[in-house]
Image (cartoon, grey):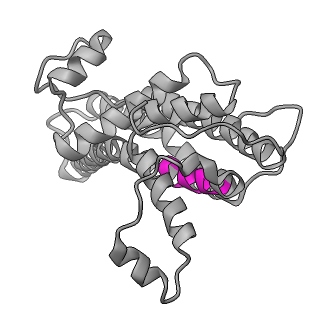
């Protein structure tokens, strides 16, 4: 997480996001690569020191090292798959954080939801039996906005006065969002729109989208920056009495 001189009253949603993100940091360490290098070195030593016509007793060492190499290879494949699916986890964590934050500022300024779709009559009837219809409207508004994607998030946050984001923050979040969608809906391959948007990757339609340790580091660092900057803004917004800004339509 980024360290800044000033502190702020962290939201529960932000604290949860920090806890969720912490275990993932271990995956950005190239431990599997180092383990593969060690095995390769061991195999080279065994092959060099133990001749092919050696006794069966010494041949056991060669077989053991080869078996370890195969196991490490399988572990490397599983790790690559885990890294690919981590984009889904990261989008889930970020979406959950942002939805809770939006709910908190909507409670401060209900005018944000002026353009939210009205609740259907059935939902209102169900709400009268116990649930708070205003609370349900707020949560549904926040959920719809989050589902609309990073472009809409930044349109609202900037109109409300959020500042301090890095130049590449929206691009990073959009890349994560779009990559997650292709992993879920496209088996991790690029379609024409993805290839065009991220032309620097030189992908053709149907190519597998590269998700590496370097990509994961970039996402994790960017998400830490985004959530901290946003949480600082939410805390400031909650402490301000001026909430006269209008809401925005989905897709603005």
Residue 116: in sight, yes or no?
yes
Asked where in the image residue 143 lies, by quadrant, the reply is bottom left
Of 178 and 77, nearer the camera is 178
Asked where in the image residue 203 lies, by quadrant, the reply is top left
Determine if the magenta segment contains residue 100.
Answer: yes
Q: Quadrant of the N terminus?
A: top right
> Residue 42, position in %: x, y?
37, 36
Q: Is residue 207 above or below residue 220?
A: above
> Residue 60, position in %: x, y?
24, 52
Of 96 and 163, nearer the camera is 163
Q: Quadrant of the C terminus?
A: top left
At x 83% / y 45%, what residue is drawn?
241
- In the displayed orientation, state which residue is furthest to the right: 6
Of 32 and 90, nearer the camera is 90
Q: Is residue 96 left or right of residue 110?
A: left
At x 22% / y 48%, what residue is drawn?
63
At x 54% / y 60%, what residue is drawn?
138
Q: Which residues are magenta?
A: 94-104
Q: Is residue 27 left or right of residue 109?
A: left
Q: Is residue 103 above or below residue 235?
A: below
> Residue 197, position in %: x, y?
29, 17
Asked where in the image residue 3 lies, by quadrant, the reply is top right
Query: Which is the main secondary structure of the residues drawn in magenta?
Result: helix
Of 161 and 14, nearer the camera is 161
Determine if the magenta segment contains residue 36.
Answer: no
């Amino acid at each position: 997480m980024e360290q800044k001189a000033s502190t702020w009253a962290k939201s529960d949603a932000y604290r949860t996001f920090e806890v969720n993100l912490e275990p993932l940091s271990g995956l950005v360490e190239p431990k599997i690569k180092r383990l593969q290098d060690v095995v390769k070195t061991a195999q080279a030593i065994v092959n060099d020191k133990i001749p092919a016509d050696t006794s069966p007793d010494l041949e056991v060492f060669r077989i053991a090292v080869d078996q370890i190499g195969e196991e490490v290879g399988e572990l490397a494949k599983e790790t690559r798959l885990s890294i690919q699916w981590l984009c889904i986890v990261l989008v889930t964590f970020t979406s959950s954080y942002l939805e809770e934050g939006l709910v908190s500022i909507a409670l401060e300024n209900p005018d944000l939801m002026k353009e939210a779709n009205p609740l259907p009559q059935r939902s209102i009837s169900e709400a009268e039996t116990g649930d708070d219809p205003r609370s349900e409207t707020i949560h549904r508004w926040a959920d719809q906005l989050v589902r609309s994607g990073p472009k809409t998030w930044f349109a609202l946050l900037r109109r409300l006065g959020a500042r301090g984001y890095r130049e590449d923050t929206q691009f990073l979040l959009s890349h994560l969002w779009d990559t997650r969608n292709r992993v879920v809906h496209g088996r991790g391959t690029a379609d024409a729109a993805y290839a065009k948007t991220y032309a620097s990757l030189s992908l053709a339609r149907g190519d597998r989208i590269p998700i590496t340790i370097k990509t994961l580091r970039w996402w994790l660092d960017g998400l830490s920056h985004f959530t901290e900057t946003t949480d600082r803004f939410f805390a400031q917004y909650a402490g301000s009495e001026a909430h006269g800004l209008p809401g925005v339509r989905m897709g603005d």
